[in-house]
Amino acid sequence: TGGHTTEILRLLSCLSESYSPRHYIFADSDKMSEAKIRSFEQKRAETFSSSQFTLHRIPRSREVRQSWTSSAVTTLYSILYSLPLTYKLKPDLILCNGPGTCVPVCISALLLGLLGIKRAIIVYVESICRVETLSLSGKILYYFSDYFIVQWPDLKEKYPKSVYLGRIV
Amino acid sequence: FRFKDSLAEDLGRADLVISHAGAGSCLETLEKGKPLIVVTNEKLMHNHQLELAKQLHRDGHVLRCNCSTLVETLQSMDLSTLKPFPPGQPEKFALFLDKVVGFQ
């Protein structure tokens, strides 16, 4: 969704072209992210001519303040949907920053890793908006990501296994 | 205004911005180097949305008030006390990620 996409594109802005091809996964209900991503990639293609990227939409796992029981059902549906997609893409690295969309994808990647099919490195960057508390995705992925990055010192104190690099967006 | 696609143009021409505590609004304004007064309403906003506004205020980047104290704030404000907001550094993230992945 909006803010998340803007942040993740900023995170990508200084990455070398070794991080290619890039597969963007976002919620089917998201109307604005596609345009932002295309614009970013278009600009990037001006410098790096061999830029490759793809876009994928998955069902949104949870609406804000959706009830727990219905969230469990929609998240399960999202996991079932993202499992074949993750299997097809077999990513080496998953970079995510907090929308509910990232949880099913990471869970799929973890499953593929457990099954010995493909082990992806999962890097989670909590939003700059999160100063004192983690988002729900963050609370879950703190335990399941390989690297968990926070952007404010308070969170580094509360979550000692996290990485603090200062503000990076 | 209703919903404009981008406020960038208006922000560019503004001398002072008064905004709600939404993160996007705050950050966009600060990145353009404009003085910002954030109007917070603790009753209305979910706790986590206030976090960034509170921190920015603590760090001296924005002035803060609520609806009833806005006029008073406008009358007594000293914008020179506001500290500039340095941009984030995605290059630090790139360096970190290169190490993690093994591109050195």
Image: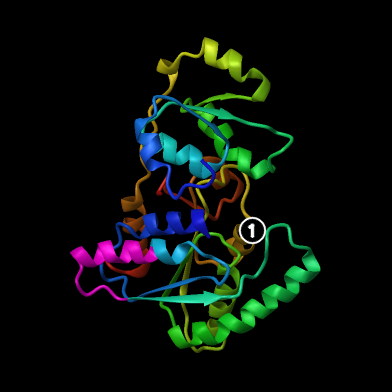
- Does the magenta portion include A153? no
Q: Within 10 Å of the Cα at label 1, are there few (<14), some (14-19), or many (20+) other Cα atoms?
A: some
Relative image position of residue A87 (x, y in whole percent): 50, 87
- Which amino acid lies under the numbered mark 1 shown in the image of this protein? Lys
- Does the magenta portion include A48? yes
Report the residue that reaches farthest toward the front.
B1
Tag 1 subunit? A
Q: Nearer the viewer, residue A104 or A45?
A: A45
Give the residue at x 36% y 66%: A38
Q: Nearer the viewer, residue B91 or A53?
A: A53
**In the rendered image, the vertical position of residue A124 relative to residue B57, given as above or below:** below
Relative image position of residue A23 (x, y in whole percent): 41, 75
Give the residue at x 43% y 55%: A6
Q: Nearer the viewer, residue B75 or A61?
A: B75
Q: How many marks?
A: 1
Q: Nearer the viewer, residue B86 or A112?
A: B86
Colour logic: rainbow
Relative image position of residue B58 (x, y in whole percent): 54, 27
**In the rendered image, the vertical position of residue A72 relative to residue A147, given as above or below:** below
Give the residue at x 46% y 63%: A33
Q: Which residue is mark 1?
A: A139
Task: Give the quarter of the image for residue A76.
Answer: bottom right
**In the rendered image, the vertical position of residue B85 relative to residue B80, given as above or below:** below
Which contiguous range is marked in magenta? A37-52
In the drawing, does residue B1 fall left or right of residue B49?
left
Is residue B98 among what the camera can see? no
